[in-house]
Image: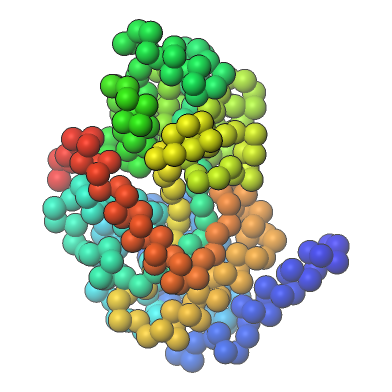
Amino acid sequence: MNRRTFLATSTAAASLGSPALVRAQSGVTRIVVGFAAGAGVDAIARKLADKLQTATHTTFIVDNMAGAAGRMAAANVKNAAPDGRTILITPATSLTVLPHLQKNLGYDPLKDFVPVTSIASILLGWMVGRGAQGQTLAEYLQWARRDPKNDTYGSPGAGSISHFLGVMFAKAAKLDMVHVPYKGAAPAQQDLVSGQVPAYAGIIGRAVINEHRAGRIRILATSMPKRSALMPDIPTFVESGYPEVVATEWTGVFLPSQTPAPIVENLNRQVRAALQLPDMVQMLQDGAMEPAGASSADFAAQVRRELAAWEPIVKASGFRPDN
């Protein structure tokens, strides 16, 4: 371990273990996750639980409440006591997209939770396979406009954030694109590689990055406001002439509303300290995620901003879920 790594590890560990940050309450703290064990959000939650438990000498467990796209978990945390012992770790979609889709959501994304901090930013983008032409977004759009069969894109599923990224881009490009929903990212990406679907809107995970580097697909643009450190050679939609195409996916930490500010701030500091630990950083980067760690106030503002931004896009899609 070099001196820089040692100092970073020592600083983060000291912050995590500071007596001022260790809750006085005894007992178990539940981290509620709305997805099955082994899923991406679950892996993040378990790694974070391990770091918090080591630092605070209290017990953290991950409680998987899979179902209804994370709504069950969010509703459970909404009704928990605001004492800091029940934590929600969820992707952005549960609080910024689903409220525009579900009439009976079971929770209010702004009133029922206190945003604590963001854990990781997840890259979204537009990619094409062997069945599409163009090395840039502009060249691809020229090709897509030449023949109606070219303006088709796949996503991991109807109602996903990837689906609505496609809607956002199609609207900005003034192109009537046909959406092909798949049952998950894997089959969609397989069809992209084989040329069965010309384009794909979705999360740029490690598998997608590897396919891009191998030349089997081409990532043409990412949807963050600025270029990602994970893919610094790929331009954003903004750089490509579409400033309105900005979409972010993230994983964040929330507590029930009415949780006292000291508990919120203590957890914020604990999580942000954990995100500085080298093995935590490595775990996120291995999953093609960028460590985040906003203040509670900044994260709350981000949630409000993105909740408002997705509303017209979801409405424009015309999509209505079955339940």
Q: Quadrant of the C terminus?
A: top left
Residue 182 visible somewhere in the drawing: no
Q: Residue at x 17, y 39 (%)?
A: 320
Tell me if 89 is positioned left or right of 65 in this view: right
Q: How is the image coloured?
A: rainbow
Q: Position of residue 262 (x, y in %)?
A: 45, 86
Res 255 quadrant in image: bottom left
Q: Residue at x 70, y 61 (%)?
A: 278
Q: Residue at x 42, y 27 (%)?
A: 200
Q: Is residue 201 above or below residue 322?
A: above
Residue 21 visible somewhere in the drawing: yes
> Looking at the image, which residue sits at the far right?
2
Q: Position of residue 235 (x, y in %)?
A: 57, 34
Res 291 quadrant in image: bottom right
Q: Residue at x 43, y 49 (%)?
A: 249
Of residue 291 and residue 169, the one placed in the foreground of this image is: 169
Q: Is residue 129 above or below residue 222?
A: above
Q: Position of residue 38 (x, y in %)?
A: 47, 50
> Looking at the image, which residue sits at the far bottom?
24
**How many numbered discs sit on the rendered protein?**
0
Q: Position of residue 312 (x, y in %)?
A: 24, 44
Of residue 163 and residue 74, the one placed in the foreground of this image is: 163
Tell me if 125 is positioned left or right of 289 in this view: left
